[in-house]
Amino acid sequence: MPGTPSPLPAVPRPCCGHPAGSPPAAGTGAYLDWVSHEVRSPLTVLAGYLEALLDGVGGELGAEQRELLLLARGGAERLTGFAEHLLHGPRT
Amino acid sequence: MPGTPSPLPAVPRPCCGHPAGSPPAAGTGAYLDWVSHEVRSPLTVLAGYLEALLDGVGGELGAEQRELLLLARGGAERLTGFAEHLLHGPRT
């Protein structure tokens, strides 16, 4: 239906949305914060697409399709956990 | 079918497969290499699941399901590009 708004946001493009136009200096805590944000932000949206599919948006899933999506979602969740770890890991 | 091997590998767990048991010192080039690897490696496998679904493994997809999967795959590809960028970006 033309004019119908898309129910889900586009996945943000890493590297292109940094307000200052360039990342903080490498090796600094701010740089790790930036990396973590750049990874987590599109992952959150990506996981949203997988969640929508698992919720049946677009139609019913077969058992194998569901299994593959659950594996993909698990990978996205672990990557999100890794990006969180960057925020809290050692920085010396 | 019992005993049939799974056609796709599990998504590697970031943070758990580093051979030395702990990451290189933060702020070093080796640390950025490690971060990049830890992001790219599970993303490659995650994208493999999405690719399999798009190839029809598990059954045919509806138009909306395909669209959501293509958006999710695009996000995974952009994240892979970001991780590549970490390998080649400034390190000063």
Image (cartoon, coloured by chain):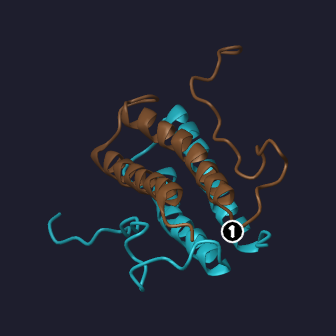
Chain colours: A brown, B cyan
Q: Which residue is mark 1?
A: A27
Q: Quick one: B64 or A9, which is closer to the camera?
A: A9
Query: What chain does badge 1 belong to?
Result: A
- Name the residue furthest left: B2
- Picture coordinates of residue B14, whole percent (x, y): 43, 66
Q: Is residue A91 left or right of residue A28?
A: left
Examine the rendered structure and indicate whether residue A19 appears above or below residue A88: above
Q: Residue at x 22, y 70 (%)?
A: B4
Q: Quick one: B13 or A22, which is closer to the camera?
A: A22
Q: Quick one: A86 or A45, which is closer to the camera?
A: A86
> Can residue B55 be seen by looking at this rendering?
no
> Can residue A63 be seen by looking at this rendering?
yes
The amino acid type, in three-letter code, at marker 1 is Gly
Q: Is residue A77 left or right of residue B81?
A: left
Q: Residue B17 occupies which quadrant of the picture?
A: bottom left
Q: Quadrant of the N terminus of chain A?
A: top right
Q: Is residue A89 left or right of residue B32?
A: left
Q: Residue B25 occupies which quadrant of the picture?
A: bottom right
